[in-house]
Image (cartoon, rainbow, N blue to C red):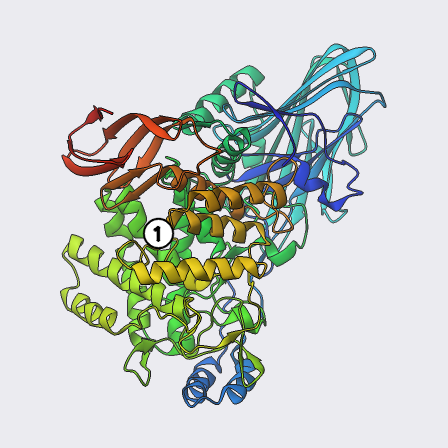
Amino acid sequence: MENFINVNDEYIFDFYADTNNKNKNAFNDALPIGNGSMGAMIYGGVCEEKLILNEDSVWLGKKNRDRYNKSFKEYFYKIQKLINDNLLNEAHHLAKYLYSSPKGECIYSVAGELRIIFEKTNAYNYKRIIDMGNGIVKVNYDTPCNKISRTYFASYPNNVIVINIKSMKPLSFYTYLDREKIFDSIEEISNDILLKYQYNEEDTLFIRMKVLTDGKKELIGDNILVSDSLNTTIYITLRTTYYNNDAFNWCASKLENLNYEEVLKKHILDYSNLFKKQVFKTNDEKINYLYNFSRYLMISSSREFSQPANLQGIWCQDVFPVWDSKFTLNINLEMNYWNVFRANLISCAKPYFSLLKRIHKKGLNLAKEMFGVEGFVAFHNSDIYGDCAPQDKYMPATFWPLGGAWLSLMIYEYYLYTNDIEFLKEYENILNDSALFFKNILIENEKKELVVVPSLSPENSYLYNNEKYNLSNGCTMDSEILRDLFNVTISVNNILNIKEEETKEYIKIVQKLPKIKIASNGTIMEWMNEYKEVDKGHRHISHLYALYPSNQINDKTKELKEAANKTLNTRLKNGSGHTGWSKAWITCMYTRLANGNKAYKNLKEFIKKSTSKVGLDLHPPFQIDGNFGIASAISEMLVRDDNMVISLLPSIPKKGLENGKYYGLLLKGNIVLNMEWNNNKVTYIELINNSNDCKKIIINFNNIIKEVLLEKSMIINI
C-alpha cells in the first residue's frame, strides 16, 4: 500500500492508474465506487479517463442448470467403501465419475467501461482522493491554463453512477461506452446513449448514459462530444433483465429529472448513515485506512437489494475472470462477512442470506438427486442462481460437501448480534436441513466416531505410501464445522422450542464426532490419520477452523491451544500466508491466541506484501476477502466478545497501536461499545444496550475484571 495523506477522512493519492491498461495490474490501482448492485473502478487519468463498470447480476452461462451427475450416488458409496478399506488408489481412480456435467457454474463478468477523452496536457498538483466519510472519489489537478475537479459516486437512492466535471475555464472532451467489442448494439435514444448486451440465453444487460452540461453537446457516432463546458454531469445506470423484465425502461426512468446537487445530497445522507455508525482511529494511519476501507468496500458492494460481495466484491475487469469471481464457500464468502456485524453494518449482511436461501433450495434437490437422502448440501462454490453442485474437475477442492453447513452458521451469528427472533424463525429450516443431511450421510469409523467419507481438507493433499491423495475418511475441519452446526442447531431449536426429537438425535451425534487430535510433532492433525502433508506451507489452514472463526480451541483447551500455535508457526515457517486472504486468516488466528505482537507483525506484512497501492487485497490478483478478513483481525486485536464477556485490548501489540478510539462497535446481545485507549491502557468505556432486557456483562480491561448490569447505557468507571 502506497503512502497517502489523510485530511479529515479524505485519503489523498498522488498517482493515477494506467488507463491504457498496458499494465494489467493497473486495475488494482484504481479507486472503487459502488451502491451494491452497480459499481465502477476509477483510474483517474488526466488526458484519458477510464471507468470499469460492473452490475452484480451479469453472470455468463446458462441460468438455473441442474448439473446433477446421475452416476454420483452409485460411485459415491463405492468410493466410500474403498476408502474405508484403505484402497486409496482405487478410490481416487473412481472419483472422476463424481464430477458434475457441465463442470462449471455461471461466471461473473465485467459489464463495460466508460472512456472520457480530454485534450492532451500536462497536469500539476494532481490528487486522487477517496472520501470514505461521504462515499465519494475525487480527481483534482491543474493544467497550464485550467483547474479541473471531478467527482464520482454511485448513488443507492437514485441507482445511478455519477461523474461531475468542473473547470475554471471552458473545457472540451468526448465520452463513450465500450465492452471489448461484443455489445449487441450502441445507439442514441432520447438523447441518451444506450448500450445493450445479451449475456446469456435469457437475460440482457442495458447500460444507459445521459450527459447534462452547461456547454454544447453533440452526438457523433457512438461518442458524445462536449465543448465549452464549465460544469458537466454524466449519469450512468445499469440493469439486467435478471432484476427487471423491463430493464430498458427501468434505466430510462432513473435518468429522468436529475439534479446533481440533489442526487449528491441524497447519496451522502444514505451512505454516511451507514459509514458514520462507527469511528475507528489509532496512531497507525495505514491500519486506520485499511479498517475504514473495508467498511467502505462493504457498503459499496453489499446493500440490501444487491447480490452479496463475491470474490472481487463487485469490481471485475475481465469477461472471464480468474476463478470466475464466484462465491467460493470453503472460506472466501464466509470471510467476506466475518466483520460485518462488528462493523455495525447489519443491513449489508442481508444479501448473504438472500443467496443462502437460493443455495438452500438448490441444495435440497442436490441431496436427493446425488446422495439419495433428505436434507440440504452445498459444495465449495456457488453462483447468482444458487448452483451448489460440485464445481470444476479439481480433486483437491471439488468434493467437499461442507460449504452449506459453514454458510448456515451465519444465521445464528445474526441472531446473537441482533436478538432478532423473527429472523431465527425464518431461517431455522436451513440449519435443520443441513443438520439432517449430515445425520443421513455420516458413517461410523473403526473408532465408532461419525465422519464424512469421502471428504477432503480444502485444496490440500497428503502422502500415503509416497503417493499424493486428497480424498480421505474424514477431515478435522469437517468435524469442527459439524460440531458447530449441530450445536448451533440444537441451540436454535431450544430457543424456538421446536423439533424436540431431532434435537435429541443431534445431541447424540455431537458426542460421537471425532475430537480434535494432536499429531506426534505437536501440531493439530489435519486428517483423521497422521499423514504427511504435500505442501507444509499450504495457504489453507483448514484444521484451525476451530481456533478461528470458531471458538472450540480456547483458554479452556490449553493443550489444543498450544498445538494450534505450533501448527500456525509451522505453516508460516514453510511459506503459508503468501496469498492475501490467507495472511488475513493467519492474523485473525494470532489475535485469537492473544499474541498481539505476532498479529501486528502479520498485519503489517499484509499491508506491505498483499495490498495494492490503494489498499486492495491481492491474492494475487485482486480478491476482496482479504480486505474483509484483515478488518476482522484488526477489530479483535482491540476487542474480544465471547458470551457476554468483553475483553478490551486482548491482543494489542506492545508497540504500534498504543493510542486510539473505537466507537460504534456492535457486540453480541445488540450492545454497542464506545472505547478509547492511551499508552495501551483503556481510558474510556461506554456501553449502549439496544435491547429491552437487562444484561449481565463481564468486562476485562487494564488487568481489571468488572461485572455490570446493563439496562440501557452506562459509562464504566476506569
2 shown above or below 311: above
Assign the C terminus to one quadrant of the image. Answer: top left
Locate residue 466, reporting x and y percent. 58, 83
Q: Which residue is mark 1?
A: 410
Question: Above or below — where is 338 with respect to 404?
Answer: above
Is residue 102 shown above or below 60?
below
One can see residue 224 in this view: no
Count up the numbered dots.
1
Quarter holding residue 690: top left
Q: Is residue 294 left or right of residue 238?
A: left
Q: x, y (%) of residue 188?
A: 72, 32
Q: Nearer the viewer, residue 23 or 497?
A: 23
Depth check: give the residue in front, 144 or 157: 144
The N terminus: image quadrant: top right
Q: Residue at x 48, y 68 (%)?
A: 389
Q: Position of residue 46 (x, y in %)?
A: 77, 25
Residue 59 horizontal side relative to residue 527, left or right: right
Q: Name the quadrant containing residue 218.
A: top right
Q: Residues within 10 Å of mark 1 (few under 14, many from 20)?
A: some
Instruction: Please give left or right for residue 649 compared with residue 541 in the image.
Output: left
Residue placed at 31% from the left, 73% from the top? 514
